[in-house]
Image (cartoon, grey):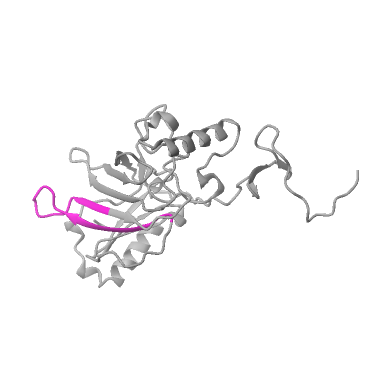
Amino acid sequence: MSIGNFSAGGFLGAALMLMSGGASAFDDSNYPDLKGQWNRQETPGIAPSFDPTKRPGLAQRAPLTPEYQKILEASLADQAAGGGGFAPDYLCISSGMPMRMTAYTPLEFIVTADTTHVAGPDGYMHRRIYTDGRDWPADVEPSRIGYSIGRWIDEDGDGRYDVLVAETRGLKNPRTYDASGIPFHEDSRTIIKEKIYLDRANRNLLHDEITIIDNVLTRPWTVIKNYRRVLTDKPVWWREDICAENNVHVVLGKEDYFLSADGFLMPIKKDQPPPDLRYFKQSRR
């Protein structure tokens, strides 16, 4: 792959390629052309969700155990009452993987000799898929984005790589599958397997087949996410996306409040109790 259009991610990719042994040591013609900006392929009338072919929430038909099905139902009930549910992203706490690959913001794939990067305008969700042949380390520092090891394969036998297979472990909570709050097991032993490849009939269509293995599930759960390359004769625009800027949610204790336009705390649910002000001098009215 050509490092491409020298967006911020492109400069990063060029620098990483040089550090990994110099431009001459890496032949990008052996890899699929993934340059450019990729947006999720939306299904009309369906909000972003883990399975992009189904509506969020119960309609996902997540193969959850009864215990964790109740947790999902509680998350949906909290949202129906005006709360944020159990997905942490609205508080600027990233759900990491696999939610990263839902592509709420555009993605950029940067292929180097030993790592494939999945970047975007939200830098705190940057993924690194190591393809240098390493084995799993004895200890992995848990993170929401996880630790990913992959390898490129030549599936059609034409002498060029066309498929990236990857596995992600070392994930920590809280995380959810999507904004509805479909939960992961509290033991954080999730394993995520991916198969990423360009469509053979349309090279501007990218597929990511994702399989989740987790102890909240009665069976592995597989979905396919699709992305379309932005086609333009102009420089690709990457919008800056800093979640914390202008975020109006304020969590105090276990309660989430809303910051009004005039700078005052507001309840987000009917009959929500006010925050505990024990450390503030109470004025008499």
Residue 25 in the image: above or below residue 33? below
On the image, the x and y values in percent for residue 261 come to: 70, 41
On the image, the x and y values in percent for residue 220 come to: 29, 42
Question: Which residue is more in the foreground, 181 or 166?
Answer: 181
Q: Residue at x 40, y 55 (%)?
A: 171
Residue 163 in the image: above or below residue 62? below
Question: Which residue is more in the foreground, 249 or 281?
Answer: 281
Quarter of the image with the C terminus in it: top right
Residue 87 in the image: above or below residue 93? above
Question: Which residue is more in the foreground, 48 or 241?
Answer: 48
Q: Is residue 92 left or right of residue 222?
A: right
Q: Residue at x 28, y 64 (%)?
A: 136
Q: How many marks?
A: 0
Of all residues, the one furthest to the top in this rendering is 45
Of all residues, the one furthest to the front in this rendering is 67
Residue 144 visible, this angle: yes
The range drawn in magenta is 144-166
Q: Is residue 31 left or right of residue 8?
A: left
- Quick check: is 160 in the magenta stretch? yes
Residue 4 visible, this angle: no
Of all residues, the one furthest to the right in this rendering is 285
On the image, the x and y values in percent for residue 36 come to: 32, 50
On the image, the x and y values in percent for residue 177 come to: 41, 42
- Quick check: is 178 in the magenta stretch? no
Which picture quadrant has residue 126?
bottom left
Q: Residue at x 60, y 31 (%)?
A: 81
Quarter of the image with the N terminus in it: bottom left
